[in-house]
Image: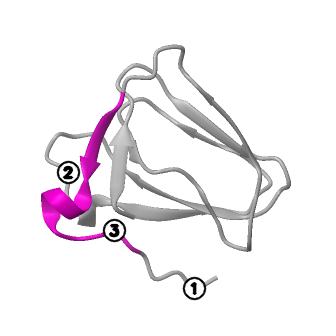
């Protein structure tokens, strides 16, 4: 993952329409974010994910092929972003065993 962001003005919702499992990288709020602050969270597909304002994230990633997600975000879509490759000379990646 080369890019992460957060929304200071509102949350964001992802819901799998086809009940397929997915992973989402998340980190707690803060201006001094580092790649090692991120944790990959696994969702079995039976529920959606609501990301509160100021939580660092970068989308959702299905664990098995393609998946369709319903998404919703605040009316104003302000975003604070980091290009991890430019800022830290590193990608964000996780070794995942499911």
Horizontal side of 24 relative to 16 (left or right) equals left
Disc ID at residue 92:
3
Q: Nearer the viewer, mark 2 or mark 3?
A: 3
Q: Check disc 1 and report its element: helix, strand or loop.
A: loop
What numbered label is drawn on residue 43? Answer: none
Between circles 3 and 1, the one closer to the viewer is 3
Which numbered marker is on residue 33? 2
Q: Residue 40 lies in magenta, yes or no?
A: no
88 drawn magenta: yes
Residue drawn at x 17%, y 59% is 86
Quadrant for residue 70, please give it. Answer: top right
Single out the residue that lies furthest toward the right: 18
Image quarter in which the C terminus is found: bottom right
Q: Residue furthest front?
A: 86
The reply to whether discs 3 and 1 touch (Cβ–Cβ < 8 Å) is no
Q: Nearer the viewer, residue 94 or 46?
A: 94
Q: Element at badge 2?
A: loop
Q: Is residue 59 above or below residue 12?
A: below
**Local secondary structure at mark 3:** loop
C-alpha gap between disc 3 and disc 1: 17 Å
Instruction: Give how far across and how far down residue 25 sits, in percent.
Output: 45, 58
Instruction: Please state the extent of the stretch shown in magenta in the rendering.
Output: 79-93
Q: At 42% from the left edge and 29% from the top edge, which residue is drawn?
A: 53
Mark 2–mark 1 distance (CA, rounded to whole Å): 25 Å
Judging by the rendered image, the residue that carries numbered circle 1 is 97
Q: Residue at x 22, y 71 (%)?
A: 90
């Amino acid at each position: 993952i080369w890019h992460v962001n957060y929304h200071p003005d509102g949350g964001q919702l992802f819901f799998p329409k086809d009940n397929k499992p997915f992973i989402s990288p998340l980190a707690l709020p803060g201006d001094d974010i580092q790649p090692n602050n991120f944790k990959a969270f696994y969702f079995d597909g039976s529920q959606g994910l609501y990301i509160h304002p100021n939580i660092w994230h970068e989308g959702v990633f299905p664990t098995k092929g393609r998946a369709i997600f319903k998404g919703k975000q605040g009316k104003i879509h302000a975003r604070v972003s980091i290009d991890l490759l430019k800022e830290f000379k590193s990608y964000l990646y996780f070794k995942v065993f499911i």
